[in-house]
Amino acid sequence: MAIAHSPLVVIDCPDPGALARFYGAMLDWRVEVSTERASACAGDGRCLSFHRVDDYCPPAWPTQERPQQMHLDMLVDDLDAAEAAVLELGATRHPEQPGTSFRVFLDPAGHPFCLCLN
């Protein structure tokens, strides 16, 4: 028997509202913003939450100088179309691309995430 249910992924960042709007737009999820936190949620209970950290320092992927702390893999059907869409939302493509079935990007706060072929 599970002790808990519906795990919540919480991501530290300097601007929770901006990051919630970024992921909300990418996933077409509802966005809620308050002063110190924000979230992007699907209608079925899945959510990403974002908390303000004043001295936030983004990861330096792929080195371990500042480890990636976390990353999200987003499943897509078309890498080129998904790349164009996330770039328009404010992501940046990482210069190092170690694979062919996925692409690495940085969200507006510098967290690495991957678009992966479904």
Image (cartoon, helix red, strand yellow):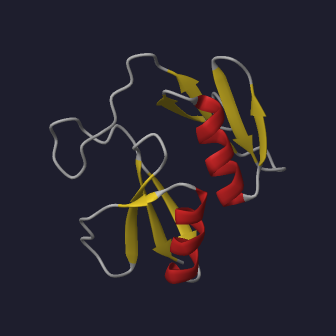
Above or below: residue 74 compared with residue 42: below
Left or right of residue 98, residue 32 in this image? right
> Nearest the camera: 9 or 15?
15
Q: Please give the count of numbered marks on the rendered protein.
A: 0
The quadrant where residue 113 appears: bottom left
Above or below: residue 34 compared with residue 32: above
Quadrant of the image containing the C terminus: bottom right
- Could you say where residue 65 lies in the image, as x and y percent from the top left? 15, 37
> Looking at the image, which residue is at 55% across and 74% down?
84
Above or below: residue 9 compared with residue 57: below
- Could you say where residue 114 lies in the image, as x and y percent from the top left? 43, 62
The quadrant where residue 6 appears: top right
Quadrant of the image containing the N terminus: top right
> Looking at the image, which residue is at 26% across and 64% down?
95
Left or right of residue 69, residue 67 in this image? left
> Looking at the image, which residue is at 52% across and 64% down?
87
- Could you say where residue 70 lies in the image, as x and y percent from the top left? 39, 42
> Looking at the image, which residue is at 81% across and 50% down?
44
The quadrant where residue 2 appears: top right
Check the image and name the residue furthest to the right: 43
Left or right of residue 66, residue 82 in this image? right
For the question of whether residue 58 can be seen, the reply is yes
For the question of whether residue 5 can be seen, the reply is no
- Could you say where residue 90 lies in the image, as x and y percent from the top left? 54, 54
